[in-house]
Image: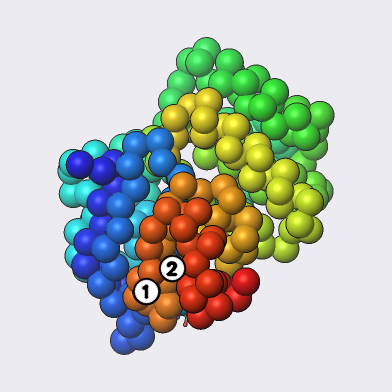
Amino acid sequence: MSLLEVSGLRAGYGIVEVLFGLDFSVDEGELVVVLGANGAGKTTTLRAISGMIPCEGSITFDGAEVRGKRPDQLLSAGIAHVPQGRGTITALNVEDNLRVGAYQRSGREVDSDMELWLEAFPRLGERRDQQAGSMSGGEQQMLAIARAFMSRPRLLLLDEPSLGLAPLVTREVFDRLRDATSETGTAVLLVEQNANLALDFAGRAYVLEAGEIVAAGPAEELQHDETIQKAYLGL
Ligand code: ATP
């Protein structure tokens, strides 16, 4: 059984339906990407899993049904969500943002984890007293990811980390993320428009179009499948 199993996922906003029955899974420690154009429903998929919007279907995590649980309950269960726009607390400095990420934990472990992540993300280590709001987009994205790791998640939901970042900075964010996941064994469900980069990073991919999964497979296969590339990935 996979760590995350989603079946028949339907969601939308009021009378507007956006997702029309998605089936997908993420294994323990696996890096999976959901690709798709603007408006395909990528963000909505993550919002549904993380309990931010109502949905239908089944979402099991580690064998237990979690559909309908609140974001804080999911965080306790081991699912952390880095939303689009990053969601750092701009008025707080780097250290305090990281502490917020560990708000459900206590004790000395939090301090030692914080040192670990400040080392793993050197740009954050250099800026531990800087207010998040005054940092660059790439630095804020790294802070948002490091903050999510402070809750020691088993699954990280990551919404378009490349948004608004220059290609080199995006590459750095992905490199740090890859190191962090291989160090901790955390699984990642990433949604991205930047197919090229995401397929380099992920092991497996799903392609979403107008709220339906239209292709799926190992990232390497999708990367070399010309039909899929032309039809869906704009490569
Ligand atoms: P992008 O890459 O542009 O972020 P996406 O694939 O993440 O796109 P979603 O944000 O999931 O797409 O949006 C899917 C559809 O749902 C779009 O048609 C969008 O307009 C609609 N939508 C998103 N959020 C809301 C909302 N709060 N209220 C109403 N409709 C919404």
Considering only vertical position in the picture, is 169 above or below 147? Answer: below
Q: Quadrant of the N terminus?
A: top left
Question: Helix or strand or loop: what does disc 1 sit on?
Answer: strand
Quadrant of image for the C terminus:
bottom right
Q: Which residue is mark 2?
A: 207
Q: Is residue 80 left or right of residue 99?
A: left
Residue 116 or residue 225, whichever sits in front? 225
**Between marks 2 and 1, how big is the CA–CA gap?**
6 Å
Compared to 20, does 143 lie above or below? above
Which residue is most to the bottom? Answer: 15
Position of residue 133 relative to residue 35, above or below, is above
Give residue 98's position: percent from left, percent from top.
60, 33
Q: Label 1 crowding class (10 Å Cα cut-off): few <14, some 14-19, many 20+?
A: few
Residue 89's spot in the image, x, y percent?
Answer: 64, 47
The residue identified by callout 1 is 214
Asked if the beta carbon under badge 2 is closer than 8 A to the nearest atom of ligand 1, the reply is: no
| Residue 174 seen in the current view | yes
Q: Are marks 2 and 1 in contact (CB under 8 Å)?
A: yes
Residue type, numbered disc 1: Val
Q: Whole-percent x and y of residue 123?
A: 78, 34
Identify the residue at image location x=52%, y=39%.
148
Pick whichever, 111 or 5, lies toward us.
Answer: 5
**Location of residue 79 in the rendering, given as x and y in whole percent from the top left corner:** 38, 42
Residue positioned 57% across, 55% down in the render: 198
Mark found first going from the N terminus, 2 or 1: 2
Amino acid under label 2?
Val
